[in-house]
Image (cartoon, helix red, strand yellow):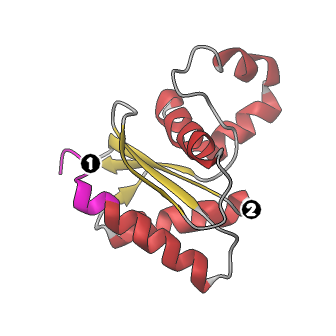
Amino acid sequence: MSHISLDQARIIIATAFAKGQELSLKPLSVVVLDAGGHPIAFERQDGASSGRFAIATGKAAGALFLGVPSRKVGEMALERPTFLASLGPLAPSGIVPAAGGVIVVDHDRAIGAVGVTGDTSDNDETAALAGIAAAGLAAQA
């Protein structure tokens, strides 16, 4: 698989929402990006705030920009805050240093990313991983 299809993106989103419902999470927003950081699909649940597209995109696109999941970006922010702060203006879609942005890979090559926001960062990441697996895709380790 060299890309994430629209059908797979829809599965990722539907499964992330189902995981959120299963875990009684706050309203989630999910974006699926291609390898270039362009949106394939986005949805937000009823009650999600209007800024969630930008946050979800910042998590996913930031992960692609740096080549690591947004959880790792958060760790980098603690270790090197000035460096990470300087990257914001360089990244076209921003960088959100919190878990919930997961790179999707095919044979260790990034084919896109998923960004989830709305609950705690750990729960956002759990929903993203569930969606990726349900679509038959793999998350970067």
Q: Residue at x 59, y 39 (%)?
A: 54
- How many angstroms separate mark 2 from mark 1 (CA)? 30 Å
User: In front of the other: label 2 or label 1?
Assistant: 2
Question: Would you call the spot at circle 1 few (<14 residues within 10 Å), some (14-19), or many (20 or more)?
Answer: few
What percent of the width, then of the height, locates residue 73? 65, 37
Tag 1, which secondary structure?
loop
Q: Does any portion of residue 141 appear in the rendered image?
A: no
Numbered tag placed on residue 120 in the rendering: 2
Asked if labels 1 and 2 touch by Cβ distance under 8 angstroms, the answer is no
Q: Quadrant of residue 69?
A: top right
Vertical placement of 27 versus 29: above or below?
below
Q: How packed is label 2: few (under 14 Cα within 10 Å), some, or many (20 or more)?
A: some
Left/right placement of residue 7 relative to residue 85 reads left
4 with respect to 29 (left or right): left
Q: Position of residue 60 (x, y in %)?
A: 51, 42
Lower position in the chain sequence, tag 2 or tag 1? 1
Q: Is residue 135 visible?
A: yes
Q: Position of residue 89 (x, y in %)?
A: 63, 15
Tell me which segment is drawn in magenta: 1-9
Q: Which residue is mark 1?
A: 107
* Amino acid beneath label 1: His
The answer to which of 22 and 108 lies nearer the viewer is 22
Left or right: 42 in relation to 55? left
The kind of residue tagged 2 is Thr
Residue 2 among those drawn in magenta: yes
In terms of depth relative to the viewer, which is nearer, 116 or 140? 116
Q: Nearer the viewer, residue 27 or 130?
A: 27
Q: Residue at x 55, y 33 (%)?
A: 62
Q: Secondary structure at mark 2?
A: loop
Residue 124 has which mark?
none
Instruction: Name the residue located 75 percent from the left edge and 20 percent from the top edge.
Output: 85
